[in-house]
Amino acid sequence: MTNTQSEHNQVSDDVFDAVCTMADKAAAAQAKLAQSTTDAKNGLLMAIADALDARADEIAGANELDMQQAFDDGMDAGKLDRLKFDVTRIAASANDMRHVATLPDPVGQVVRGFEAPNGLRLQQVRVPMGVIGMIYEARPNVTVDVIALCVKSGNAAILRGGHAAERTNAATLAIVKDTLRELGFDDALIGTVDAHGREGATAMMEARGHIDLLVPRGSARLIQAVVENSKVPVIETGAGNVHIYVDRTADLDKAIPIILNAKTQRVGVCNAAEKLIVHRDVADAFLPIVAQALATADVVMHADDVSYKIIDEANIRDIKLYEADEADWGTEYLALEIGVLVVDSMDEAIAHINRYSTHHTEAILAEDYGAIERFTKDVDSAVVMVNASTRFTDGGVFGFGAELGISTQKMHARGPMGLQEMTTTKWIGYGTGQVRA
């Protein structure tokens, strides 16, 4: 029993050893990948994308079984939408992988450099992280995204994709491993602990020294469990208690389609709007209009006292309106539900957001430049949108081709995580015989 293993009792010795062995093999494969040229990595990505297209029916068939099982188990509509990985979505993921292949290779990029007075030339350059562990739920497209980003950035990946998508992920990984072998790469580069279930995820959290970085992506509960229990360094991602603030200077006609898109375009995603905050000066005019639009879209509203009174008196047909309680302000619904709050000032709006937000994405709808500048400066979140839907917080939209997740912490990566965020740096000193006095 290793020293690391002896400190933990939540996972069996056999599972812990199996996961550490898998990670060590991935590290050896990653060392070989790190010697590959950019052209070789791009060629591998193109080949995997082509194989995914050619064998999409295999993945889609497995996904149909996962979808049916999840439906029978009572999975809600939002999560079912995330779980869906049909031929159309597989093609989109394959195209995202091709796009990643076209992006600049971050490995070897010089971040900064200078020459010391003694002539020693110093450079800080980007290098791969090593072995990246990913724990995620019911999101089979993430499997493809992670593989694309890891290959391009020179990293290995150990995945725990969750029980709900187990068949889909297995079919996808089988195709990826076949392609790795066909092109002469070690298929240990991409591994999965799904066969070990939850114990596999726990072992990943305990595998310090074997896995270099762990990224959870999923529910707030999953992310918090990983953050609190992992001995491997963690980048916190994902949970999105997302706010839209309608300022007193907002263009109210422009606001309606933005709010509807942010709330209803896809409800089960982390960048969907969960809270609507309205300035008191426009509340009487705006709330009945937006409430009507939300009611037509079958959105349930949880309203504070002021907004409840205004909306209730509008006598909107078939509206689903409830009085909000304290728990609502911190809830990520991931459903056709939204919290509604009226505030007397922007100060109050910012204070509320910074208190209850998960620091993912917030938006301001305003026409006053001063208000926009104040909001974007003082709101403490990874992304702030101005007069635009929160749904734009996405690695693809940001030009990254794919994303590892949306980082909500304040370390080296914040916001959508693309290729650069999957590298670390090393310093190289070029000398001509210098010694330190």
Image: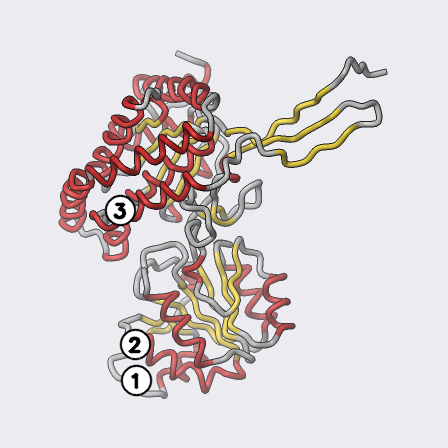
> Residue 229 in the image: x percent, y percent?
44, 34
The three-letter amino acid code for the residue at tag 1 is Ile
3D distance between C-alphas at marks 3 and 1: 42 Å
User: Which residue is identified by label 1?
Assistant: 316
The three-letter amino acid code for the residue at tag 3 is Ala
> Crowding at label 2, few (<14), some or many (≥20) Cα neighbours within 10 Å?
some
Residue at 41% across, 46% down:
401
Q: Could you say which disc has been placed on residue 200 in the image?
A: none
Residue at 23% across, 57% down:
77
Figure check: 17 above or below 316: above
Q: Could you say which disc has been placed on residue 91 in the image?
A: 3
Ranked by sequence position, the earlier of labels 1 and 2 is 2
Choose mark 3 or mark 2, whichever is in front.
Answer: 3
Residue at 23% across, 37% down:
166
> Crowding at label 1, few (<14), some or many (≥20) Cα neighbours within 10 Å?
some
Q: Using residue 355 as the reference point, say whether residue 313 is left or right of it.
A: left
Q: Secondary structure at mark 3?
A: helix
In this orientation, does residue 133 appear?
Answer: yes
Figure check: 421 above or below 271: above
Check whether the beta carbons of the residues at disc 1 and disc 2 lie within 8 A of each other. Answer: yes
> Residue 43 in the image: x percent, y percent?
37, 31
In the image shown, does 209 or 58 lie closer to the viewer? 58
Q: Could you say which disc has been placed on residue 295 in the image?
A: 2
Choose mark 3 or mark 1, whichever is in front.
Answer: 3
Check whether the beta carbons of the residues at disc 3 and disc 2 lie within 8 A of each other. Answer: no
In the image shown, does 50 or 59 lie closer to the viewer? 50
Q: Using residue 351 as the reference point, say whether residue 263 is left or right of it.
A: left
Where on the picture, by quarter, is residue 66? top left
3D distance between C-alphas at marks 1 and 2: 8 Å
Q: Using residue 400 as the reference point, say whether residue 121 is left or right of it.
A: right
